[in-house]
Image (cartoon, grey):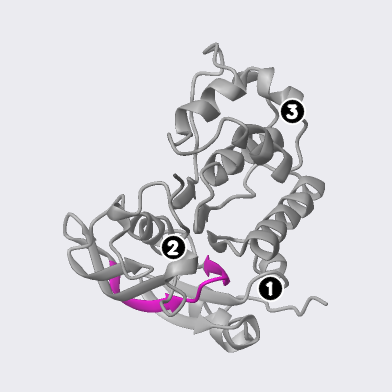
Amino acid sequence: MSTPSLTHNKRHLNAIELERITTYYGEEKVLDRISFSVKKGDVAAIIGPNGSGKTTLVKVIVGLITPQNGRVQLFGKKPQSLHGRIGYVPQRFTFDRHFPILVDEYLNLARAQRTNTKALQKAISEVGLQPSILHERIGTLSGGQLQRILIAQAILNTPDILILDEPSTGIDIVGEAVFYEILKHLNEEHGTTIIMVSHDVSRIANIVTKVICLNKKLICAGPPRQALTEKRLKELYGPHTNHHEHH
């Protein structure tokens, strides 16, 4: 019997809720009292300069890092208790390209026992790839194909939340446009709550419902028009930041 979706059982709860999250690496404070929430069905982006704590924040949300102070909940539960309900695409995926593992073998490693084997082809279709790619070696894929496979792996078990860290890295402009269409499809067709780290402010402005501005402290959190103002961006990236409107 399949497990009912948390999004159906917990409609009254925020998908993601952080309260005064503080995290250290040794003596260095990486996140300083971060508090914000993301509603179910939102597409949210975390932006900020290099070294601002974006990847650390993502790992806190996923449950890979336990903060020294504060509370993080996903649909009212601790992230560690939601195994299989969180899809995660890390910033870097390093592996031996000569290792003889096929795409379907890689995806099967991530498939939960409750998930039907037909889910592999469905996930491949969702990210715009042909079923024949299942029989190709991971090491022979292009950067864009590999990124789509990582997303397919992340959505394989029908997660309620999809979290991506710099997901368009290594993809060309055409592939990036297709990639964002995939995210839009997942959000609109399946109601997947999406949170992603991005460096491309102009691109994410048109696809997200919430922007989280981070530089160790929370600079702002709100709709794009509220968060992506010239004043906020200069506060986030420094006084020499140039701000341009994209339509």
Q: Looking at the picture, which amino acid does disc 3 mark? A: Pro
Q: Is residue 127 visible?
A: no
Q: CA distance from mark 3 to mark 2?
A: 29 Å
Q: Which residue is at a point 69% across and 61% down the rendered structure image?
A: 189
Which callout, 1 or 2, points at the residue further toward the start of the chain?
2
Q: Position of residue 11 (x, y in %)?
A: 47, 75
Q: Is residue 173 visible?
A: yes
Which callout, 3 or 2, points at the residue further toward the start of the chain?
2
Q: CA distance from mark 3 to mark 1?
A: 33 Å
Report if the CB atoms under discs 3 and 2 are less than 8 Å apart. Answer: no
Write down the region rendered in magenta: 31-46
Against 34, is 131 above or below?
above
Mark 1 neighbour class, 10 Å CA radius: few under 14, some 14 to 19, many 20 or more: many
Question: In this rendering, which labeled residue sits more in front, label 3 or label 2?
Answer: 2
Q: Which residue is at a point 37% across and 74% down the rendered structure image?
A: 17
Q: Which residue is at a point 45% across and 57% down the rendered structure image?
A: 4
Q: Which residue is at a point 43% across and 68% down the rendered structure image?
A: 9
Left or right of 61 on screen, residue 88: right
Q: Give residue 210's quadrant in the image.
A: bottom right
Q: CA distance from mark 1 to mark 2?
A: 28 Å
Q: Looking at the picture, which amino acid does disc 1 mark? A: Ala
Left or right of 190 on screen, residue 72: left
Say which element carries label 2: helix
- Quarter of the figure with the C terminus: bottom right
Tell me the tag on residue 6. 2
Q: Position of residue 201 (x, y in %)?
A: 65, 68
> Which residue has dot 1 on it?
205
Say which element carries label 1: loop
Mark 2 neighbour class, 10 Å CA radius: few under 14, some 14 to 19, many 20 or more: some
> Which residue has dot 3 on it?
131
Against 117, is 193 above or below?
below
The secondary structure that most of the magenta stretch takes on is strand
